[in-house]
Image (cartoon, rainbow, N blue to C red):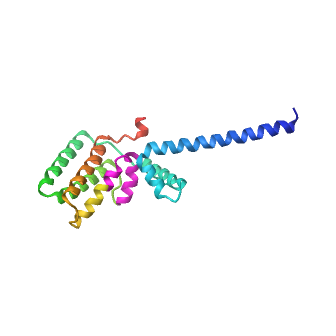
Amino acid sequence: MSTGTLLAIVIPVAVVLVLIGVAVGLFMRRRHLRERFGPEYDRTVEDADSRIAGERELKTREKRHDALDIKPLEEERRKRYRRDWDGVQQEFVDRPETAVHDADRLVTSLMHERGYPTEDFEQRLKDLSVEHGSTLKHYRDAHEVDVLSMEHRASTEQLRGAMTHYRTLFDELLTNGGQSRHARA
């Protein structure tokens, strides 16, 4: 076989193998992001200008999150938060709007104690999305009702739903123990 014929076979095969490698790499990256971010993957990609831009945003979130010092709570602190949550739930009977505000503050306090920055709501969402993407919708929905209740525009049913949403995130933050999925895997 001549050198020209050999090159005519080897070069296309090499190109095909490189393309397969790139495709597998992209598939694995996308799969990793989907698994790590859950429903937040689709939301972020949909809100971005392109899939690549959305995935870039998620990778940026991952890097920022990995630099945070997210830590587990000591058992005594966990019990105190649980008691505080029980008090907020009891408060709902007589003062539902106040209870929703207090639930928001308690969740924010728990996030702060675990090591999440809590200054900006949008940044909180991004930071939480890395480890809590499956419960992030609950937080968004609860916060939306909290904002409505500040203007006294939330119905009792909306307030009740907000408490349920806050409890979902609260329970996850309280029981997670600060272990990232990478550490648990």
Up-down relation of residue 115 to residue 177 (above or below):
below
| Left or right side of 158 for 87 | left
The residue drawn where x is 24% and y is 39% is: 75
Q: What secondary structure prevails in the magenta region?
A: helix
Residue 97 at x, y percent in the picture: 18, 60
Residue 154 at x, y percent in the picture: 22, 62
The residue drawn where x is 42% and y is 50% is: 40
On-image quarter of the C terminus: top left
Residue 68 at x, y percent in the picture: 40, 49
Of residue 1 and residue 123, the one placed in the foreground of this image is 1
Which residue is the extreme one toward the left?
A: 94
Residue 32 lies in the magenta-colored region: no
Which residues make up the magenta segment? 120-140
Of residue 7 and residue 80, the one placed in the foreground of this image is 7
Residue 74 at x, y percent in the picture: 26, 41
Number of marks in the rendered image: 0
| Left or right side of 38 for 167 | left
| Left or right side of 45 for 139 | left
